[in-house]
Image: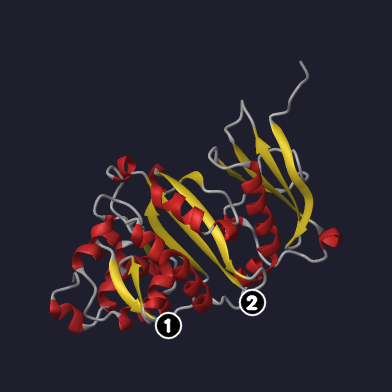
Amino acid sequence: MPFEPAQRLLSGPDVGGGFLLQLSEERPPLPAGYTYHLQEGGTDAAAAPAASLEPLGFSHPAAACMFGGPRCWERSFEAPEESPSSVRNNYNRFRFILGPLLEQRAGRRPVPIERGLTELLDRLLEPLRATSVPWEIGGSTGAWIRGVPIAPRDIDIGTTADGARAIGGLLEDARTEPVHERVVRDGLRQLWGSAFLGTLVEGVRVEWGGASREVEQHAPEGEWHGPGLWTRVERFDWHGRRVPLAPLEFELVRLLERGRAPEAEAVLRTAEGSLRVSTLKIALDRSVLSPEQRADLGQRLSPAAHSSGRLPS
């Protein structure tokens, strides 16, 4: 019987965003899935990459890559439900938009957030409402929709496992990776996906994730998971659309964790008197903020907010 390798090359070598790229398919005994391999291409790729791939979930493998040399980047996807042809389409869109995406990350290209959000809502609102799929927009885009003067770089969506599959289908032509299983914070396994809405040059990165109901019931409370997740969703009117949003308290705490105090203060100015004690407590319970940072947060809160009884002292 002839030897069949555990990895099979599906595409490449290709060029995009200053990298040489290849796509491989994993077979038993490896977990069923796919891997994107990227190597800085130098003159072969026409330009140097504008930013690191690490924030996009890529890492350097411990050993030399099967494809791409000793210092390549890799990202693998456990996606047994996806066909090779579908993943190849995702991979091709990824390599086509990689240059503009990295330029956005480096601050060299503006993110057309309003255009991208409009397209996203046009694609998702009615289909997800018709099937009663729960979902929410959070992060910096959720704050921006509320009028906080902040500059989102992407759109983050929380949903269920079924919702992750549904969104993956609705955004199939714009996906940059397969819908796949991923381990996130606290060891929680979710279905995850990403897309780039807009043109190949001017677009917005969208990410979404969701766990099964069984996993969700045992997950700690947070912005994206926990038994009380869907009771905390808020609705906000944006350009005639009723948009489901994650509570702003989570973005406030996250900004402070990342040392982005001016943006946190902008959140406090915009939401003065409307932040909720119970939700802020959930965000702080799981936060890495130090006691000093928590005390500083208390000092930033306005007297009006304190006197309303809606914020912790």
Pointer 1: residues within 10 angstroms few (<14), some, or many (20+)? some
Give the mark nearer the N terminus: 2 vs 1. Answer: 2
Which disc, if any, is residue 109? 2
Of 39 and 28, which appears nearest the observer?
Answer: 28
Looking at the image, residue 147 lies above or below residue 161: below
Left or right for 141, reference 234 = right
Is any atom of residue 138 visible in this view? no
Rounded to the nearest angstrom, the CA distance separating label 2 from label 1 is 19 Å
Which disc, if any, is residue 149? 1
Left or right for 102, reference 71 = left
| Number of numbered markers | 2
Element on which disc 1 rests: loop
Left or right for 289, reference 298 = right
Colouring: secondary structure
Is any atom of residue 67 visible in this view? yes
Q: Quadrant of residue 31?
A: top right
The residue under the point 24% across, 63% down is: 279
Of the residues shown, which amino acid type is indicated by label 2? Answer: Arg
- Which quadrant does the N terminus fall into? top right
Looking at the image, residue 92 lies above or below residue 205: above
Of 294 and 139, which appears nearest the observer?
Answer: 139
Which disc, if any, is residue 302? none
Q: Quadrant of residue 17?
A: bottom right
Looking at the image, residue 256 lies above or below residue 30: below
From the top left corner, tell me how far across and down residue 307 is, in percent: 13, 80
Of the residues shown, which amino acid type is indicated by label 1? Answer: Pro
